[in-house]
């Protein structure tokens, strides 16, 4: 990051690129300070965080639930797979306007847009994780007369957790894209709206501030999930060490 910052500073200092296209780091820092002090950045960031949080919660919940059902019922996969793949293969920007028409330009449409984009990674990873459970261990649980919830709690969930958490890492970063895409289409608040506003005003430093804020949020979410994974999978490290 320091190297990139140095290269950026050298490019602008020697005038290799117009300051309108690539403002100097000091100018972007001034725009950041102004946006923070005026409360502009906080207001739009809170809107995007709200959309991301509830959209991520909704998409992950549906992906986990449906993924588990599909993993346990191949017939359900045969019925739903063509629909899910066709729906997922359509770019999010294509049906984001429809969601806004149906749900309005408030946070609801952005939450659903976020949920749609984070749903597929969780679905695929949940299916892969549940189906990767060793069959001999499943037979052992059956021989012990374990109930379905006991098999899920003590076998399926611990075995599939690494794969599920990998999907959660992907979904967490995609949540930023889902919320911002919805804001690009139609919104009166949020970081996507702030980028559109800054673009219309030809305020390039403010665009950089908005983009860097999105990047920071995505990296923070990824780090939070990585920390959660480290905590939840501590038993694997202990068992491998022993």
Image: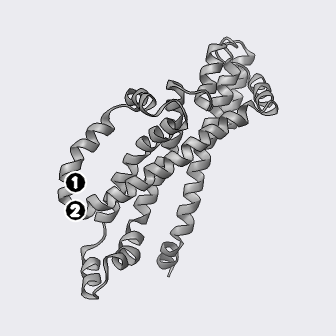
Q: Position of residue 55 (x, y in %)?
A: 50, 45
Whether 12 is drawn above or below 114: the answer is above
Dot 2 falls on a residue whose secondary structure is loop
Residue at point 72%, 22% (across, down): 10
Q: Position of residue 17 (x, y in %)?
A: 65, 13
Q: Position of residue 204 (x, y in %)?
A: 67, 18
Q: In the rendered image, is residue 178 in sight?
A: no
Q: Which residue is farthest right?
A: 37
For the residue pair 26 and 225, the one nearer the viewer reads as 225
Quarter of the image for the N terminus: give it: top right
Locate residue 52 relative to residue 216 in the image: left or right. left
Whether 140 is drawn above or below 121: the answer is below
State how many labels appear.
Answer: 2
Locate residue 229 relative to residue 145 in the image: left or right. right
Q: Which residue is mark 1?
A: 77
For the residue pair 237 and 174, the one nearer the viewer reads as 174
Q: Position of residue 94 (x, y in %)?
A: 38, 27
Dot 1 falls on a residue whose secondary structure is helix
For the residue pair 65 and 99, the one nearer the viewer reads as 99
Label 2 neighbourhood size at 10 Å, few (<14), some (14-19), many (20+)? few
Whether 232 is drawn above or below 46: the answer is below
Whether 121 is drawn above or below 178: the answer is below
Residue at point 27%, 84% (across, down): 140
Locate residue 192 relative to residue 129 in the image: left or right. right
Residue at point 52%, 44% (across, down): 173
The answer to whether mark 2 and mark 1 are in CB contact below 8 A is: yes
Which of the labelled discs sits on residue 73, or is there none?
2
Distance, label 2 to label 1, CA atoms, is 7 Å
Q: In the rendered image, is residue 47 in sight?
A: yes
């Amino acid at each position: 990051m320091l190297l990139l910052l140095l290269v950026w500073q050298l490019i602008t200092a020697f005038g290799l690129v117009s300051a309108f296209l690539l403002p100097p780091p000091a100018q972007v820092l001034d725009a950041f300070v102004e946006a923070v002090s005026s409360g502009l950045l906080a207001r739009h960031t809170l809107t995007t965080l709200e959309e991301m949080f509830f959209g991520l919660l909704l998409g992950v919940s549906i992906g986990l639930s449906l993924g588990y059902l599909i993993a346990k019922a191949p017939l359900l996969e045969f019925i739903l797979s063509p629909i899910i793949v066709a729906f997922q293969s359509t770019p999010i920007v294509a049906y984001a306007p429809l969601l806004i028409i149906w749900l309005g330009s408030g946070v609801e449409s952005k939450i659903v847009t976020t949920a749609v984009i984070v749903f597929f990674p969780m679905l695929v990873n949940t299916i892969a994780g549940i189906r990767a459970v060793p069959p001999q261990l499943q037979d052992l649980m059956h021989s012990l007369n374990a109930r379905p919830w006991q098999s899920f709690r003590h076998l399926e969930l611990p075995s599939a957790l690494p794969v599920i958490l990998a999907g959660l890492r992907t979904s967490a970063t995609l949540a930023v894209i889902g919320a911002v895409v919805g804001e690009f289409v139609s919104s009166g608040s949020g970081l996507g709206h702030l980028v559109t506003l800054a673009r219309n005003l030809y305020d390039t430093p403010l665009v950089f501030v908005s983009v860097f804020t999105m990047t920071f949020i995505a990296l923070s979410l990824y780090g939070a999930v990585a920390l959660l994974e480290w905590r939840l999978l501590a038993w694997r490290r202990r068992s491998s060490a022993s």
